[in-house]
Every structure is written in structure tokens, then in C-alpha cells.
Amino acid sequence: MRFNQFFLIAIFTALAALAAPATAKTQVVMLGTGTPIPIPDRSGPGVAIVVDDTPYIVDFGPGIIRRAAAASTEYGGTVEGLRVDNIGTAFLTHLHHDHSSGLPDLVFTSWTHGRKAAFELYGPEGIDKMARHVLEAYAEDNRYRLYGLEPATANGWKINAHTVDEGVVYTDDLIKVEAFRVRHGAWPNAFGYRFTTPDKVIVISGDTALDKKVEEYATGADILIHEVFSEAGVAKRPPFWQTYHRDNHTSSYELGELASRAKPGLLILYHILLFGADEESILNEVREKYDGKVILANDLDVFE
């Protein structure tokens, strides 16, 4: 009887271990770290948060799908979850073209590569209009692929556009996504996002001037991905542009001070405006105010 009892306990323990979910794995992939300035080795802004091989895209500047393909195991990279046909959910911080002009490529290339479900798109007011016009612009191509000699899946061309406001905007078994408004010049609807996965909290600023909301949502986060401009570089700009950039973006000194208060586990710089300064100098400017871990990201950097 005693032997049978231990035997049953062993069986139940083994079955419980099999049933328990494996530890989640979150990867952050920098698909684009650039700005409207067409620097060849920095694509337009785009970040992939990949949780257990499920990707969530934040912003989709020029080159987004080619960068995702380069990062994927399908084309020699290291990230299994960035197979092109696996990309089906994205979040937009604001409607500036450098963050959004990759939308047709994001939707239609992943569709013609094999994605079956409609694309789920989240963003500020105007996202539905953007999605509708993209579909209208490519209606003939989509018709040909649906009914011509290049058949594609029946529903993958569709876009389900969701307008976001502050608060929780998306949840599934792997992730919770919260949107928060940020101050980006005259834009009435510009957002940052906070992603909570089973093993990480990741905050993405989008384009923003120094904003307390970013600090609030980034406090204690594992990773803060934040835009930045060089303090020394902007000082060389004409007065009008100095004012413009300070109203729309965050300086290296301001970001260093914000990070010192929020204390993220890792600070990642992207959407980098150098204005003639070099990359090491902008890092040094941040480090003057912040003694935590900070990295200036390049396209295709992967953080696990």
C-alpha cells in the first residue's frame, strides 16, 4: 500500500510538471532605430516584442519587413518568432510617416508570405482611416492575388483597425499592453506603450518630449526603449529648430535624469537624433545624468 501511494504521487508529480507552462521567453528586437532622416543603416522606427515566438510590432517605419526577415531564422537570423507569415499584430505610437509608412509592406508581404488571419492593427485616432486608404490603394493588387494567377490566403489581406486610448488596449495569454499619452509637439494623439509579459516589463516611449507619463510607466520596468536627441548637437541648430526639437523630443540630459528616477533595468536609446554629434558623445551625455545600464541600439540588435 505504501509503495502504491509513493508510485501514485510520483505519477501525479510527473504529470503536473508536464502540464505546467514552460518559463516564458521574451525577446526585444530593434527592427528600426532611425528617424525621418534617411540614414541607410537605420531603418524607420520599429520594435518587435516576441513572447514565446509570438511577435508584437510597435511602429512600422520604412524597411520594417526586410528587417524582420533579416532577424528571423527563416532568413538566417536568430529569432524564430519573426517568420514573416507569423507577423499579424502591430501597435502604432502616432501617425508620423516615419513610424507608419511601412504599413502596406507589413500587412501585404506577411499575407502573401502565408499569413491566414486578418491583420490586427492598434493605434491612435485616424488609424482606421489609414488602414482603409491602404486597402483602397492596393485593391487591384489584392484582387489579382485573390482571384488571379498568384493565389493568396482568403482573409490575410484584411486589416482590423482598433483605435486606442489610455489604459489597457490589448491582452492575450502572453501579454498585456497599456497605452499612455505622451507630449509630442502639436500631436493630439501620441502614445507610448507598456508591455507586460510573464517575464518582462517593457516600455516604449514613441516620439515624445520629456514627459512624466513615461517616467510613471517606466518606473521599475525591465527595459525602457526611449527616443533621444544630442544636447550638444541640437545646440548647433538654428533657434527655431532648437525650440521645435525640445517641444517634440527628449534630450540626452533630460533622458538621463528621467532614467535616474525611473531606474529601468536597461535603457535602450533609439530614434536617435545626432545633429552632427557622434554616437559615443550622446551616450556620454546620458551617462552624465544616469549611472545605470544604457545601450545605443542599432538595427537588428536582439535583447533577451
Image (cartoon, rainbow, N blue to C red):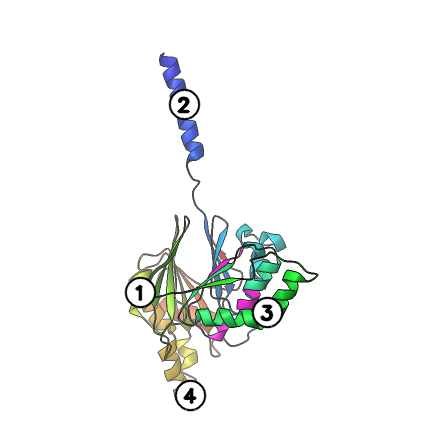
Observer able to see residue 122: yes
Q: Is residue 289 magenta?
A: no
**Of the two numbered discs 1 and 4 in the rendering, the one whose residue sits closer to the viewer:** 1
Look at mark 4 in the image and give the residue it sits on.
238
3D distance between C-alphas at marks 2 and 3: 60 Å
Residue 10 is labelled as 2
Residue 156 locus on image (x, y percent): 56, 58
Q: Amino acid at mark 2?
A: Ala
3D distance between C-alphas at marks 2 and 4: 74 Å
3D distance between C-alphas at marks 1 and 3: 43 Å
**Of the two numbered discs 1 and 3 in the rendering, the one whose residue sits closer to the viewer:** 3
Mark 3 residue element:
helix
Asked whether disc 1 touches disc 4, contact meaning CB atoms under 8 Å apart, the reply is no
Observer able to see residue 289: no
**Of the two numbered discs 2 and 3 in the rendering, the one whose residue sits closer to the viewer:** 3
Q: Amino acid at mark 1?
A: Glu
Residue drawn at 38 percent across, 22 percent down: 9
Look at mark 3 in the image and give the residue it sits on.
139
Residue 111 locus on image (x, y percent): 58, 59
The answer to whether 88 is drawn above or below residue 93 in the figure is above
Name the residue furthest top: 1
**Of the two numbered discs 2 and 4 in the rendering, the one whose residue sits closer to the viewer:** 2
Mark 4 residue element:
loop
Mark 2 residue element:
helix
3D distance between C-alphas at marks 2 and 1: 49 Å
Badge 2: few (under 14), some or many (20 or more) residues near its Cα, within 10 Å? few
Label whose residue precedes the other's in the sequence (2 or 1): 2
Residue 210 in which image quadrant? bottom left
Q: Amino acid at mark 3?
A: Ala
Residue drawn at 52 percent across, 72 percent down: 133
Specify start and end residues of the magenta stretch as a single range. Answer: 87-106
